[in-house]
Image: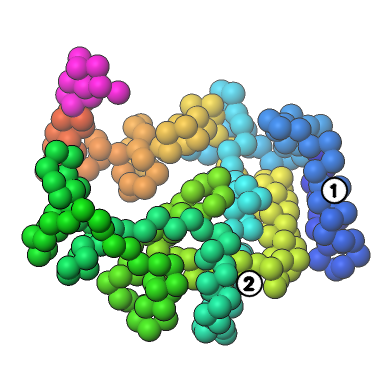
Amino acid sequence: MLTYNELIELRDKLANGEISLELAKAEFWNDFKEGQRSWHTKDWKERRSKFIKDKCQICSSKEILTIQHLSHPRKHTEYIREITRGYAKEYMNSNPEIDKSEFSNYVLKNYDYVPVPLCPNCKGKNPSERVRKTPKYRCADCKHEFDEAVYKSVNELISIFYENEEAYEVRDKCFVSKDKWRNKNNLSNVRYWLQRDSAKNKDAETIEKEAFLQYLNDNIKYLSFEDTITACRKCASSYDLHKMELCPKCNTHYKGIQYPTCIECLPEDKRKAALEIIEFGKEWREMHKKLGID
């Protein structure tokens, strides 16, 4: 795992074009082990002593103090997704039109088509399928009974889509991706993924480089102790595990970080309502427990 100064040097080299993206990644991931934590390194421990205070900045306790980060780096893949989304949006704005044959080829190559059954009389969708009675189908719209449903072909749906993107016939998510996720999409979704893939292929190296630089920057920020406070073990675990912090009004009770005060410091009417909600939640969970409901 690279030290703080080594990360800065690597980031600067990559940003200035002194090292390729492939070499930068190789250098960063070299000796990286799953589950390895930066706070176990010698570099961290040496620099930590310069930043940690003599008491908890939340409750003023002096017992078992630690550095509490208020922000953390995200996964590398999250940066790639975010930047790809931005490039895709820009690509869509500058390339709103897609060749129909290109779109058709993309659909057939990347998606399995699961057609929606239609009534042969009124073309209503999803007629009721009967197990015992005959004919097999009955249309809920026109009440027509029939044995064989009709279906629209992929090309028919694409033609309708190119005439009217909001058409009733093309709203169904009947295109299943051929990847491991097997996501269901309608043609509007499929068009987005085509444009996204086109943007990604066009600017693949730029996207990868920007994402990796952002990832490095956030890791450098994390190692710099920039966005940190000194906290005791109780305050640190409350923040990390339960997203709670000490109430700034009473400095006694903990509160959710999204709330301005703890329940005890709320006005009487709001405090009473909050306690009733909490009590109801406890009773509900207890009932689930007795019934064996997870």
Front-lying residue, 104 or 23: 104
Helix, strand or loop at label 1? It is: helix
42 with respect to 149 (left or right): right
Main SS of residues in magenta:
helix
Q: Position of residue 161 (x, y in %)?
A: 39, 77
Who is closer to the viewer here, 88 or 214? 88
User: Front-most of 253 and 292?
Assistant: 292
239 with respect to 251 (left or right) = right
Q: Alpha carbon of mark 1 to alpha carbon of mark 2: how far?
A: 25 Å
Specify the amino acid type for callout 2: Ala
In x, y percent, where is residue 167? 30, 76
Q: Quadrant of residue 228?
A: top right
Choose top left, top right, bottom left or bottom right for residue 53: top right
Judging from the image, what secondary structure is the residue with disc 2 in?
helix
Q: Is residue 141 visible?
A: yes
Inspect the magenta stretch and tell me whether residue 287 lies in it.
yes
First to last magenta residue range: 283-294
Up-down relation of residue 15 to residue 68 (above or below): below
Q: Residue at x 43, y 67 (%)?
A: 154
On screen, 181 above or below 186?
A: above
Q: Which of marks 1 and 2 is nearer the N terminus?
A: 1
Rendering colour mode: rainbow
Contact? badges 1 and 2 (CB < 8 Å): no
Is 8 displayed left or right of 252 in the figure? right
User: What label does residue 199 carry, if any?
Assistant: 2
Instruction: Tell which tag, 1 or 2, sits nearer the viewer.
Output: 2
227 is within the stretch colored magenta: no
Quickly name the residue at label 1.
Answer: 26
Q: Quadrant of the C terminus?
A: top left
